[in-house]
Amino acid sequence: MTDRQKVVLVEPDAGVGAWWEAALSEEGWDVAVVSDPEVGFQLIRRTRPAAVVMRARANGGMSFRLLKRLRSSPHTALTPVAILHDQGDDQTDDFDRWGGHVVSGHPVLPAAVSTVLRAQATPPSYPLAPSEIIGDPARLAVLANTRLLDSSPEAVFDQVTRLAARLLDVPTVLMSLVDRDRQFFKSHVGLKAPFDEARETPLTLSFCQWVVADHEEVIVPDAREHPLFKLNAATAPEGVVAYAGVPLCAGTTQAIGSFCAMDQKPRRWGAGDLDALHDAAHVVEGITAVRLAANVGSQEAGEFVLTAQAVGRAIAGATRLITRHESRISEAEHAALITIVGELGRQLAELRGPGA
């Protein structure tokens, strides 16, 4: 058996799972059965099977939630998913909309499932992240309220991106804000023409949209070998090979963009690299959080707590950058981080108000 013949079957009912395992094995698949969706997701993400199989009616919406999660991760977005549908009156439009391949029948025949899975091919062009996430009105409202889209470069953000590029020893670092159909670079180091002047690209060239969609860090040692990112026109020979991006949430539950590092050669991102990337991201996120809070005006208690937490992470991140990289940080960079910490503390106190 080759890797392309492996299937993960996510099925909470042990009896149903055993039946489908035997049936799909007869069809020539190497089947791994898991009952828990979280275990299934992690297995699919780690092993990258040829396909996933689930029942439409399994465990009160489990299948649909897992499908959405699979389609939101760049590591599983292209994995074919067969949805077994043996009830004619069930609604399957949502499965179709999220890229599930519905196989209907009463009963559903294993041969039909096998035919559907083997017919799925790698898409000819780079797919966009789910529009339900990228185009979510609540997310776009948060992004608009930061007032950073299409704004001029600012030294406070540029200081952090330059420092991150130097500490990670990479040619390119971006503070990328992901809009409905483009990504705008509030700050950048190492962008080539014409993007250095335009300070934006369409989402068809964006890796960062997947950081927003997955709401998790996205780490790619070599985009040329990644099933999704190898389809991106920004990938080598002249462009991105290694990529590491972390979400920017600006003191909210919404991811509005990514703070990312890129290299033009393969790279195993080490723990020190990712620590520095996260610390720098926390700093720019804290700056953005207090901007957002000031622009929106009065905050509910829960919203202020999120802002305060973002500022706390920013201060901790700046402190770690200073202490962990003391010998590599210049006096000017040290002073800039100290100034940022002081300003964040002052701005948070102003947001809370004198009577709080």
Image: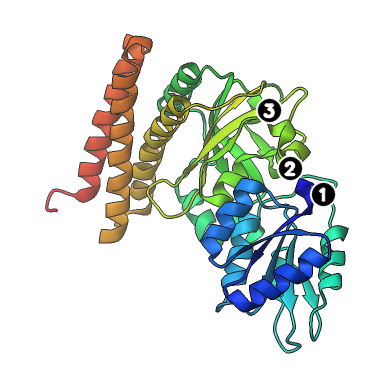
Q: Which residue is mark 2?
A: 227
Looking at the picture, which amino acid does disc 1 mark? Thr
Q: Residues within 10 Å of mark 1 (few under 14, many from 20)?
A: few
Element class at badge 2? loop
Residue at (80%, 86%) from the top-left corner?
Answer: 106
Q: Is residue 298 above or below residue 55?
A: above
Residue at (55%, 48%) from the top-left corner?
Answer: 212
Query: Are the residues flagged by discs 2 and 1 in contact, CB closer than 8 Å?
Result: yes
Looking at the picture, which amino acid does disc 3 mark? Val
Query: Are the residues flagged by discs 3 and 2 in contact, CB closer than 8 Å?
Result: no
Circle nearer the viewer, 1 or 3: 1
Q: In terms of depth relative to the viewer, which is nearer, 66 or 34?
A: 34
Residue 318 locus on image (x, y percent): 32, 28
Q: Cα distance, mark 3 to mark 2? A: 15 Å
Element class at badge 3? loop
Q: In terms of depth relative to the viewer, which is nearer, 72 or 195?
A: 72
Q: Is residue 51 above or below residue 354?
A: below
**Type of colouring:** rainbow
Q: In terms of depth relative to the viewer, which is nearer, 117 or 132?
A: 117
| The disc label shown at residue 316, or none | none
Looking at the picture, which amino acid does disc 2 mark? Pro
Q: Is residue 96 visible?
A: no
Residue 19 locus on image (x, y percent): 70, 75
Q: Which residue is mark 3?
A: 240
Residue 169 locus on image (x, y percent): 52, 16
Q: Residues within 10 Å of mark 2 (few under 14, many from 20)?
A: some
Q: Which residue is mark 1?
A: 122
Residue at (35%, 17%) from the top-left corner?
Answer: 325
Q: Cα distance, mark 2 to mark 1? A: 8 Å
